[in-house]
Image (spheres, rainbow, N blue to C red):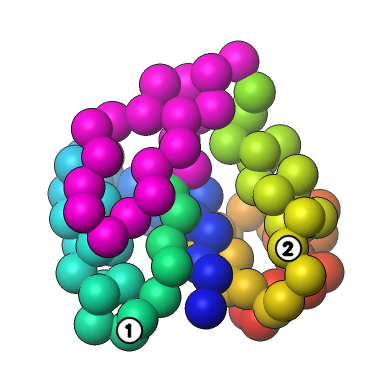
């Protein structure tokens, strides 16, 4: 199953905030265990890629806009990982959760 991760949002969900590298490490471990296709989307430049996770840096586009656009292209259900209510409304129509 495809999993779209709003990386800036998820990084700030814990205190202290997760570093981009730590988030990707945890996501890669989880994706491998679950057999998921994980895409971590970052505002601006992407951190260094890790095996098992597609890492996207959005450049001038916001991560929210990139995720919304990608979600519109997906034909099957997917999982959207964010606590951003506006993003869930914009991109979550076909999301499992």
Which residue is at 62% across, 29% downward?
62
Q: Residue furthest top?
A: 60
The answer to whether residue 12 is seen in the rendering is: no
- In the image, is 65 to the left or to the right of 42? right
Q: Which residue is more in the foreground, 32 or 93?
A: 32
Q: Position of residue 13 (x, y in %)?
A: 38, 55
* Magenta-drawn stretch contains 97: no
Q: Residues within 10 Å of mark 1 (few under 14, many from 20)?
A: few
Query: What residue is pinned by disc 2?
Result: 74
Span shown in magenta:
41-60
Residue 95 sits in quarter: bottom right
- In the image, is 40 to the left or to the right of 72? left
Q: Which residue is more in the foreground, 6 or 14?
A: 6
Query: What residue is pinned by disc 1?
Result: 34
Which residue is at 69% across, 49% downward?
70
Secondary structure at badge 1 equals helix
- In the image, is 26 to the left or to the right of 53? left
Which residue is at 27% across, 60% downward?
52
Q: Position of residue 34 (x, y in %)?
A: 32, 84
Q: Main secondary structure of the magenta part?
A: loop
Q: Residues within 10 Å of mark 2 (few under 14, many from 20)?
A: few
Secondary structure at badge 2 equals loop
Q: Which residue is more in the foreground, 92 or 51?
A: 51
Q: Position of residue 78 (x, y in %)?
A: 63, 73
Q: Position of residue 91 (x, y in %)?
A: 76, 57
Q: In the displayed structure, would residue 55 be above or below residue 15?
A: above
Q: In the displayed structure, would residue 84 be above or below residue 97?
A: above
């Amino acid at each position: 199953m495809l999993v779209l991760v709003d990386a800036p949002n998820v990084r700030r969900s814990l205190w202290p905030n997760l570093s981009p590298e730590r988030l990707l490490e945890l996501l890669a471990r989880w994706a491998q265990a679950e057999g998921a296709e994980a895409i971590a989307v970052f505002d601006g430049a992407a951190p260094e890629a890790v095996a098992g996770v597609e890492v996207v840096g959005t450049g001038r586009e916001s991560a929210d806009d990139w995720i919304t656009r990608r979600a519109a292209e997906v034909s099957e259900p997917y999982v959207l990982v964010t606590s951003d209510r506006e993003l869930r409304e914009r991109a979550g129509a076909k999301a499992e959760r």
